[in-house]
Amino acid sequence: MKQSRIYLNLCILGAFIPWYILVGFFGTENVSLPSFFISIFANNVASAVAADLIVSGLVFFAFVYFEGRRMGLKHLWIYVLATLLVGLSFGLPLFLYYRAKAIEQSVEL
């Protein structure tokens, strides 16, 4: 199986699972965006996971910028937006998918 296909499958999984869980969260009564952010930092464990994801997201944004420019990929903002709207589990494999596709196409030439 090609590397790009693996990233595409992980991208789909990374979009579906967080949204499935969040739909359940936002489907309850009296839920708002502020309560969402309060829940993210509800205790030390949740705060540690949230902090880890925030730092990992910032590292990913830097990687997208430098690696995307190096490889000549276009529309780099899409990967940042995908990460902010869904999560790192979607934005990262999405970027890696398009990066792998670009590498595969350059190898075929």
Image (cartoon, rainbow, N blue to C red):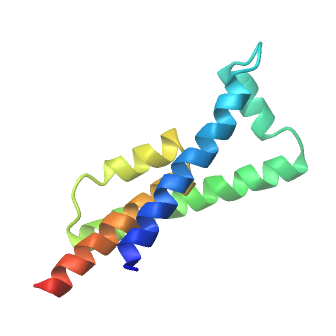
Residue 99: x percent and y percent? 32, 70
Quadrant into which the N terminus falls? bottom left
Q: Is residue 69 above or below residue 48?
A: below
Residue 23: x percent and y percent? 64, 30
> Looking at the image, which is closer to me, 15 or 73?
15
Residue 89: x percent and y percent? 56, 56
Compared across the picture, whether 83 is left or right of 75 comes to right
Q: Is residue 54 above or below residue 56?
A: above
Question: Going 73% across and 29% down the picture, which residue do you hit?
Answer: 25
Tally of numbered discs: 0
> Looking at the image, which is closer to me, 22 or 67?
22
**Quarter-of-image position of residue 7:** bottom left
Compared across the picture, whether 56 is left or right of 63 comes to right
Question: Going 25% across and 52% down the picture, which residue do you hit?
Answer: 75
Residue 4: x percent and y percent? 36, 72
Q: Give the residue furthest to the front.
A: 1
